[in-house]
Amino acid sequence: MPDVVIFAPDPAVGMSVVLIADLCWVAATQAGGEPSRAVRVVSSGGDTIDTYSGIRMSVDGTIDDVDSASLVFLSAFWGSSSDAVERHRNVLPWIRRLVAGGARVAACSTGSFFLAASGLLDGRVATTYSPYAPTFRRRFPEVEFHPERAITDAGGLMCADAISSSLDLVIACVGDLYGREVAEHVASEFLMGIRRSYTVANLAFDGQKYHGDRLILSVQRWFERNVDKPVLLHRVAREFGMSTRTLSRRFKSATGETPSRYLRRLRVEHARELLSEPGLSVGEVARAVGYTDVAAFSSTFRDLTGVPPSRYRHR
């Protein structure tokens, strides 16, 4: 079973296929695996595919050669979404089978049309390449569509809206597959100089929002909006008409974590992003994620990441 399968549609956005494949090859190599076995590029029929620029690309085989995988990427097509989905009808049950077998799926740019057409995104959050947003909304009314989002994660069914955010999504996915150190190596070696607007920190929390408790979802979104401010739990509970005890009970039941731990993790993930950028001291980062005590921030950061913030920055 390959670790990663990349579906290449026809006609493909060539750089979508190649960028995903290159980053996954590097990650598999860094993890000590054999990339030719760990990463496979497939098409619906196993033939070479055309790109929108006229370049022909070879693939490793057909979707029928793959009956299981840990991670599936649906790369971008070019042209009519109706034509693309119709041309690749046989891909839709294949996606459903792999997901049923435990695979996570990452749809990059227009690749989200294949994931939505499979029916797996009904009632779940998604995004897509912005010029295709009106078509996506009209074609898939059952999907909770958020075109303003760069990346979404509906419990392992992920979408990225463009090439730049697809790079972030690849890094997040290989981190989940091979570990954070591998992901950080790939990002530091190959994405230097790419200033991305999407904060990868958000991805880790989307999967904890499919619990059906609308009030707790509102609390989670409130935390995200106020990550830079000190938060007192009893005031949050009062803001949402609950006692502190009720908030804690419902929050843990919905997300699997206490509000305090969830908020700490949210702060640390945002701090990791800030520390990867030059110009901010550790103290400034601490204040930017709601800590007035730098020592407390450093202690929390070390507890959750294994290293103090100063060492993380140097890494």
Image (cartoon, helix red, strand yellow):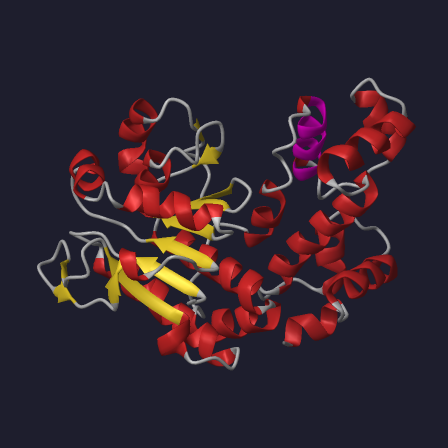
Is residue 227 shown left or right of residue 48?
Answer: right
Q: Is residue 161 visible?
A: no
Asked where in the image residue 56 lies, by quadrant, the reply is bottom left
* Front-lying residue, 291 or 93: 93
Instruction: Residue at 41% x, 23% y: name it.
Output: 142
Q: Position of residue 69 (x, y in %)?
A: 44, 60
* Front-lying residue, 105 or 300: 105
* Front-lying residue, 48 or 279: 48
Q: Would you say residue 218 sits in the magenta stretch? A: yes
Q: Main secondary structure of the magenta part?
A: helix
Q: Position of residue 267 (x, y in %)?
A: 72, 50
Question: Range of the magenta residues?
Answer: 215-224
Q: Would you say residue 46 sits in the magenta stretch? A: no
Is residue 221 shown left or right of residue 114?
Answer: right
Q: Position of residue 302 (x, y in %)?
A: 79, 66
Q: Which residue is farthest top? A: 241
Is residue 94 shown left or right of residue 50?
Answer: right
Instruction: Residue at 54% x, 64% y: name it.
Output: 177
Instruction: Residue at 78% x, 21% y: name it.
Output: 240
Q: Which residue is farthest left? A: 54
Q: Is residue 19 visible?
A: yes
Quadrant of the image containing the N terminus: bottom left
Quadrant of the image containing the C terminus: bottom right
Q: Position of residue 172 (x, y in %)?
A: 52, 58
Residue 127, above or below 64: above
Residue 128, above or below 30: above
